[in-house]
Amino acid sequence: VEPGALAGRHVVVTSGPTHEAIDPVRYIANRSSGKQGHAIAAAAAIAGARVTLICGPVMLPDPPGCDVIHVESARDMLAAVEQALPADVFVGAAAVADWRVEAATQKIKKEQGAEAPSFALVENPDILASVARAQNRPRLVVGFAAETTNVIAHAREKLARKGCDLIVANDVSEGSGVFGGDENEAHLVSPIGVESWPRLRKEAVAERLVARLAEILNEKEAA
Ligand code: PMT
């Protein structure tokens, strides 16, 4: 990335999983480590942006040069993102839980002989779609698509349904090692086409993505 490619820009990135409480001791989670989102935040900071990184529970250190806000649930993440706007660019790399349960305020007890509890799932807010439709919509709204089948087709559908400018699609099938791993194979899906990158370290995916975001912003402003 050119140093200063994002100078003067505010970039908001989400990263990591969300945890959705079941009761005070249990939660629903997923396998996101935050490596990809954190690498994007770090690369944007190196490119000169002011970066706000909003992350779910991860084991990673805060990347240097970023304002980091730690959250737990999808609803907390949405509130933190709304607080962080306005921005020039939003990148939604977090694996946000699509559903939560109505959390119990006390630990759910295992009673002798009683049936296993069952939970009704409630839909979580869609952070990406909400940012893309906000009054103060960032100029560039970038989502991810984590897919296990028909990666490009599903990414195209998400691009349209969530109203974003670009989707970074990645195949997270079992055996791909993308969730939690160090490498990713990304496809950039936009209304004008698909750009497929080879399998790269997540830091390299982040650098390429940040370079493309700087180019796209400049093109949009020149238009
Ligand atoms: O964290 P790592 O271990 O490095 O792994 C990286 C990753 C696989 C998590 C990452 O590259 C990735 O794909 N992130 C998006 C994961 C995901 O939740 O994808 P999705 O296809 O379910 O969601 C599509 C988009 O909508 C994403 O930008 C997501 O952040 C957003 N979303 C989804 C649901 C929701 N309620 N709110 C959202 O904003």
Image (cartoon, helix red, strand yellow):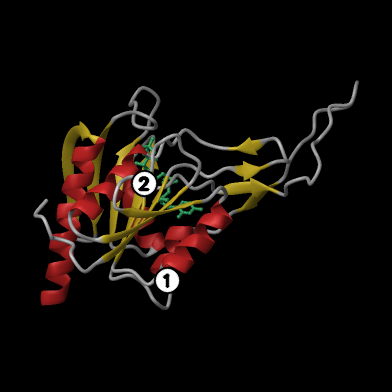
Find out if the beta carbon at label 2 lies less than 8 Å from the nearest ligand 1 atom: yes
Label 2 is placed on what type of residue? Ala
Name the N-terminal-most of marks 2 and 1.
1
Q: Residue furthest front?
A: 64
The percent position of residue 35, horizontal first and vertical second, equals 34, 37
Task: Give the side of residue 216 with respect to residue 157, left or right.
Answer: left
Total number of numbered labels? 2
Q: Residue at x 18, y 46 (%)?
A: 207
Disc 1 marks which residue?
133
Choose between 22 and 115: the one closer to the eye.
22
What residue appears at the point 41 percent right and 61 percent down from the top-left corner?
162
Report whether 25 appears left or right of 114: left
Q: Give the position of the C terminus as an image quadrant.
A: bottom left
34 to 210, vertically: above or below: above
Residue 190: horizontal and vertical position, in percent?
23, 57
Element type at marker 2?
Answer: strand
**Residue 130 seen in render:** no
Task: State the image coordinates of residue 108 (x, y, percent, origin top left).
Answer: 81, 35
Neighbours of disc 1 within 10 Å: few (<14), some (14-19), many (20+): some
* Label 2 sits on residue: 145
- Res 142 → quadrant: bottom left
